[in-house]
Image (tube, grey):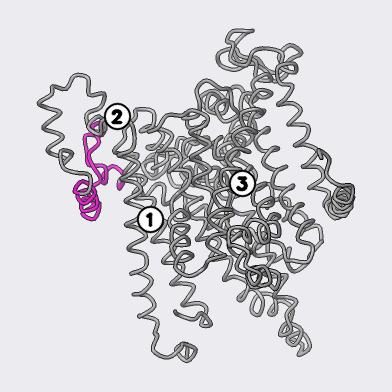
Amino acid sequence: MLLPPLSHILRISVWLRGFWRRYRKNKGAVLGLFFLFFLALVALLADFISTYDPMEPAVGLRLQPPSRHFLMGTDNLARDIFSGVVHGSRVSLLIGFSAAFTAILLGGVIGSISGYFGGRVDDMLMRLCEVFQSMPRFLFALVIVVFFGSTIWNVVVVIGLLSWPRSGRMVRAEFLRLRESEFVTAARAIGIRSGRIILRHILPNALHILLVTGSLEVGAAIITEAGLSFLGVGDPNLMSWGRMLFNAQRVFRQAWWFSVFPGLAIFLTVLSLNLVGDGLNDAMNPRLKRVQRQQHDQ
Amino acid sequence: MGLFFLPSGCSMPAYIIQRILQIIPLIFLILTINFVILHLAPGDPVSFFVQGGAGATQEFVDNIRKQFGLDKPLGAQLGIFLANVCRGNLGYSLYYQDLVIRVIGERMPVTFLLVSLATLFAAIGGIGLGVVAGKYPYSIADRITMVVAVVGYSIPVFWFGQMLIILFAVQLKLLPVGGVPIAALGQGGFVDWCRSLVLPVIGLGVVHLGLIARITRANMLEILGADYITTARAKGVRESVITFKHALRNAILPVITAISVNMGFVLTGAMLTETVFSWPGLGRMMFDSLMRRDYPVLMGLLVVMSVGITTLNLLTDLIYAYLDPRIVYT
């Protein structure tokens, strides 16, 4: 009972093998995936990898260049930058994935309702979408976090709330296409309720869209969080990459290592996520044209 | 001639009016959201006006409450807020001892300069790269373009700025670190002023350039495969004419949309870039206001930016409609 039937496992493994064969063609995507695995490992084992407590001041001298003791140098309070970068991966990954999950959950729900029912519901939801898309996302996030406090979960909720329109629009488009297809008409004809049709019949066919936009949202959320922390409104109790760049802003002209390493970590992570997103898109939509990126992530 | 393509009973002016009418409720909604955020925020709104509020007597607080209509019900307050925004009254900043709208207005040109130069740089560079890449797909130029594109939208704009400073200003000593706009024109001269613009404009522009290049490339690829291009080639039209006159003119419309859709992103990017380069524009002011918790200025910036971006999108729609006679005005 605990194991799914063998035929299921076989079918999934066949699908996975085909998927991997298509995914593998995109070298950048494979590289990005490896980097993300590596990063996840670093985040998991942060306590063992880091050489010092990232928040602990005065572990050495202030603003020391990289050396054998301090692999990435020390910052203005003589904290170890290497340990900060290692621990920062936790914050970035946590915020990135949670915010993206919130965004695609909201986008998925709103997009499927909008696309399935159409008409006035669709009109209203798409207006709402327009409102959210015309708001300067970063500024709104900034003001809300300043007003409501900069805990990590506030940051997650705000980024998630402000980021759903992209996935919402894409899911809607897919639902609009699929709801006219024969299997949906058939399901409706035998009297299956709308909720079940949406969840069991259409949604599985639109999942790849959530996965692709989701991977792009993670990168976008990480950059947004870094930007917030860079302006000094991130969670003050956590060492994040953006926060390190905020600390570095006054002194990076004298101490290049202070800003190079945390920024490089953000850049490589977001780059990997974008490469994986493109790879997923190619591998899951082999026949469809690549979903065109019209809007910037930040 | 353009009117020939329009469906009967719908003209260009009618379309313009209709779009403007559509945008009013949108701006109204965005402003309402601004208002709701301000009121949901924990803490007495009076403290937004009386900073700290610690030394203020009850009488003074009550006075301010009355003066700003904070003793009225929420609906009435929303009305007052909207009326004030329509009149251009965005509140008063105690720090600057001035109206918020005037404080923002003073710094607007500096930010506007940075944003327009960066957009121009990104548009020229991005379209140029995109055309070459679309013309010669899978060539080295194409590969470089695609790398620039993916790096462009993965790099945090503020970190890129810091890296430019470290490389070009600190290590190579080629260019000045910070922006010295307009005010320095009299002292340092025009050349110095231009030199100080280079790094911020590149820092903000490159991030945007990648996306434009990618969209241009995709559209060029699609259009260069169209039948009418083959026809033009068969007729013996020169390649340069085909590329620029036949293909690019058609490929450019979606690029214009993308540039407009991303103006909000460029504006917020400008705020971060200004912080890095100590550029005395809106972004710098926002950062300083954050540090001193100057809420009226922050709210004012939010209102100005939201309305600005919405208006800009409207303008693009209108330009688009003007450029592309095939658009059906509904």
Q: Work out whether B125 lies above or below B301.
A: below
Nearer the camera: disc 1 or disc 3: 3
Please report the residue visible at 52 percent of the width from the left and 29 percent of the height from the top.
Answer: A152
- Using the rendered image of the protein, determine whether residue A98 is visible from the camera's viewpoint: yes
Asked whether B328 or B266 is in front, the reply is: B328
Asked whether B284 or A175 is in front, the reply is: A175
Amino acid bearing label 1: Gly
Amino acid bearing label 2: Gly
Q: CA distance from mark 1 to mark 3?
A: 25 Å
Please report the residue visible at 78 percent of the width from the left and 55 percent of the height from the top.
Answer: B143
Tell me the number on the disc at residue B308.
1
Marks 2,1: beta carbons within 8 A: no
Tell me the number on the disc at residue B43.
2
Pointer 3 residue: A217
Q: CA distance from mark 2 to mark 1?
A: 29 Å
Q: Work out whether A276 lies above or below B322.
A: above
Q: Helix or strand or loop: what does disc 3 sit on?
A: helix
Query: The N terminus of chain A lies in which quarter of the figure?
Result: top right
